[in-house]
Image (cartoon, rainbow, N blue to C red):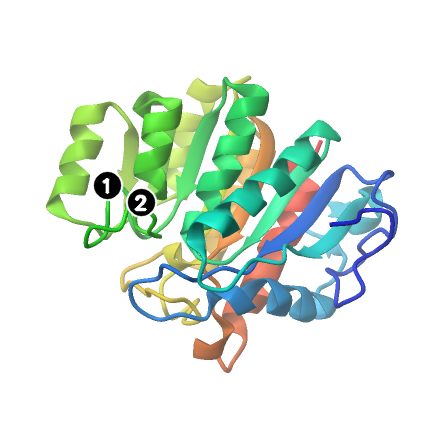
Amino acid sequence: MRFDEAYSGNVFIRSHPNYEESKAVIYGMPMDWTVSFRPGSRFGPGRIREVSLGLEEYSPYLDKHLEEIHYFDAGDIPLPFGNPQRSLDLIEEFVTKLLQDGKFPLGLGGEHLVTWPVLNAFHKHYRDFILIHIDAHADLRENYEGELLSHSTPIRKACDLLGARNVFSFGIRSGMREEFEFAKSSGMYMAKFDVAEPLKSVLPTLAGKKAYITIDIDVLDPSHAPGTGTAEAGGITSKELLEAITLIANSDLQVIGADIVEVAPAYDPTEQTQIAASKFVREILLGWVK
């Protein structure tokens, strides 16, 4: 993909037209080839961009304005429909280029499997970093009905890649018994049900560490985010997720990249899911990109 000119489609609000001058790069990963319930998250990145036009550019949470940071919207990575492995390879190649250019990658999904090739690119570039995972689902399966490439597997793969003790999950309220047993025995950190309060306890212990952060929109209760492929009752509010993003922004953690995944616009005609996601993107840009 060319970076010498702005994306020709809809862009995230106040996207800078010049790639070279930008600190962060927004990019879409429109893939939902392995979902186990409702497809449609491949349309998430585009709709998050479109509804961002309704955002205020000022954040009262962080007392910052989008004019204070240059970020470039590179559009969606063109992925071959129905081909998971080739799609993952293309995502890894794309993110590798961003890292080589010194950019802060901010990905929009897409199903949660798209985080896996991103982590591979980061691991080759940084080696030593932790993963913060905010989600309703454990995503610790080794396979889903025999399929190794599944949106149910990326965090298990991350534990194998980074070491389980470098993986921190928050908001988890769904998974197989074996997944929760793995979390206990492996040494990874898992906070069930809540996000903000456990983050307050954990963040001081992670001061100075580099961190990649992945947010699955279904960590929110379906009353706050019905537009997702595998909604789970009993989730957190959008207010709590905004608090969590602010806590990370004000911590001594060094965030090196992030993604927001699993927004499926077709299941939310009210648009509250994609509107919330676009606001989270604004806060990430203002709070995590240093």
Q: Which residue is mark 1?
A: 142
**The C terminus is located in which quarter?**
top right
Q: Please state if 187 lies on the left or on the right of 118 as rendered.
A: left
Q: Which residue is mark 2?
A: 153
Q: Nearer the viewer, residue 65 or 69?
A: 69
Q: Position of residue 16 (x, y in %)?
A: 84, 51
Q: What is the C-alpha distance between the residues marked 2 and 1? A: 6 Å
In the rendered structure, which amino acid carries the disc numbered 2? Thr
Q: Nearer the viewer, residue 133 or 18?
A: 18
Q: Position of residue 265 (x, y in %)?
A: 51, 73
Q: Secondary structure at mark 1?
A: loop
Question: Residue at point 38% right, 39% down?
Answer: 197
Number of numbered labels in the structure image:
2
Q: Estimate how packed mark 1 is, as few (under 14), some (14 to 19) or many (20 or more) residues with alpha carbons within 10 Å.
A: some
Q: Secondary structure at mark 2?
A: loop
Question: Residue at point 80% right, 42% down?
Answer: 69
Q: Position of residue 280 (x, y in %)?
A: 58, 53
Q: Please state if 184 lies on the left or on the right of 198 as rendered.
A: left
For the question of whether residue 182 can be seen, the reply is yes
Q: On the image, which quarter does residue 125 sit in?
A: top right
Q: Please state if 34 lies on the left or on the right of 146 as rendered.
A: right
* Callout 2–callout 1 Cβ contact below 8 Å: yes
In the rendered structure, which amino acid carries the disc numbered 1? Glu
Question: Residue at point 87% right, 39% down?
Answer: 21
Q: Nearer the viewer, residue 122 or 67?
A: 122
